[in-house]
Amino acid sequence: MDYFSHSLSVALELIFQLDPAVWQVVWTSLKISLMAIVIASAMAIPLGALIALNEFAGKRFIQQLLNTLMAMPTVVVGLLLYGLLSRRGALGDLGLLYTPWAVVIGECLLIFPIILNLTVVAIQSADSRLLPTLHSLGANRGQTMWMVLSETRFAIMAAVVVGFGRALGEVGAAMMLGGNIEGFTRTMTTAIALETSKGEFELGLALGLLLLSIAFLVNLFLQLLQRRAV
Amino acid sequence: MTALYKLDLVRYGYTKKTVLDITQLEIQENSITALLGSNGAGKSTLLNLFAFLDSPQQGVITFKGEKVNADELLSFRRQVGLVAQKPYLLQGTVFDNIALGLKFRAISTEMVKKRVVDALEMVGIAAFAERAANELSGGEAQKVALARALALQPTVLLLDEPFSHLDQASIDELDRLINYFVSREGHSVIFTTHDRLHASALADEVMGLVSGQVVYAPLLNLFRGQVAGEIFKTEKISINLPADIRSGKQIAIDPSEIVLSKQSLTSSMRNSYQGRIVMIAEEKGRVRVTIEAGERFHVQITHQSLNELGLSLGEAAWVNFKSTALRVL
């Protein structure tokens, strides 16, 4: 227990002394996750609305597939992308492996099905009178989609937050695709894994605490938004 | 004159259940039409077809002489205004809700403002503009939905059970509004109700719906039973059917096609029942006589024939009608 409490006090010191090594890692993590969430959301939210608002053959299959993909192990994404991005891979010439972009792509792939699926669910669980109301008011396709997204925006924002949490907290893809290069692709999760295995438990703990705090703040922000809307 | 709506062989349903089955239906322009029927008769479904929210699986709908194409519903939708029975209001203020349909039509901001204010005043809720939509009571929400439809200046107003949750003062107000709406050239109102008296008092035409089928006669003499050969048997009486009908579970008899007499008639009318007069009432300038003759028959006659026949309550009378006055459903 001594070991843990001692480590905790050192970890807190590291955080409050604004240790540059710590903050560098936090910044890299946030940058990569934010980039991933913006790109994935920009694609998944409109596509989710299209899937939810239209009837087509194979819709059920797509939803089942999305449910499966939501639980996709991060190392599998890492593995597949590694195969594509490594020198001998199909996209090897782009030289993306071990850059932040590789991690962004990996995290995008990981959270895209999550945001997509949760968006579809959010729209499908909206009031059944919403669509007929919009149609009877004379909304065209684009206006209908926009208003449906606007009416369900809090559920969709929750989807984005879930995706952000997943991107921020995953370690498999970030490790395999980013390579944990200091100051470049070292994220909070890969740093925790590395520092702990190096015996730098305090630094790992400091990063872990920060990771939890960020997750907490993001959720708090979402809750405040939702409360204001009610 | 072209009809406002014309339906031909329209069928709407789900895999196992037919909700609407309409052979032919016409609704005239510049009129008030009431759709009368019990719960589940298909009233709301028919109103949704009139609002172009849905298309029938079979059949043709013509609107103002133009055939409605299921892929081009938007331009039709923008000509009609619908107020649902339990309207959905979007997040935001009452003003936002009423302005929404106008914004969809890319109308200028000043014009939107003016039309929202006009609509609010028309419905008598001018003070509501800045209230949050989710804080309104059911009756208030219904008024907002009505203003929201009126702001779009449709030529057809479709109202689903508009009177069901209103107090008497609001009912009178709505009656006036409906009459004002149709008083303008080319404007029409269609509303659903299960209040027969209100329907016949307000509407130019009352259309009954029974199990998804249209009955033009007011549904006053509606009997359930079974067909047995040439006879329709209700629980209490047997009625002769026209020669060509051999199936059906309900029959309706137009109250204006029933002949009343004090003695048994010797005529070509195949159905005659003796009964007792249990009610005489005035209705829209005519007289309704109700006779208990096994089943309860409602008969519509003029004041003149009431005097000539000298009918009074409690007396015996004969109900006579041709088998062709029947409609089998």
Image: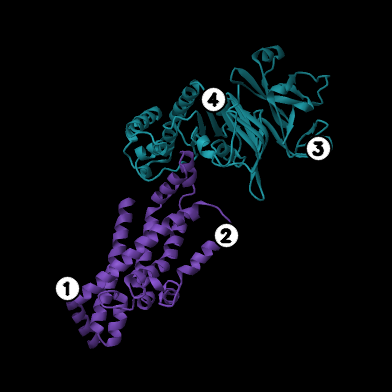
Residue B299: % across, % down:
68, 23
Residue B118: % across, % down:
37, 28
* Position of B255 relative to B36 (above/below): above
**Residue B20 appears anywhere in the view:** no
> Disc 3 on helix, strand or loop?
loop
Q: Quadrant of the N terminus of chain A?
A: bottom left
> Disc 1 on helix, strand or loop?
loop
At x 19%, y 80%, the residue is A9
The CA distance from mark 3 to mark 4 is 36 Å
Q: Amino acid at mark 4?
A: Leu
Dividing the picture into quadrants, the one containing residue A177 is bottom left
The residue under label 1 is: A18
Q: Amino acid at mark 1?
A: Leu
Left or right of residue B110, residue A48 in this image: right
The residue under label 4 is: B202
At x 47%, y 45%, the residue is A141
Q: Amino acid at mark 3?
A: Arg
Q: Are marks 4 and 1 on the same chain?
A: no
> Disc 2 on helix, strand or loop?
loop
Which residue is the extreme one toward the left?
Answer: A17
Foreground residue among A162 and B273: A162
The CA distance from mark 2 to mark 3 is 45 Å
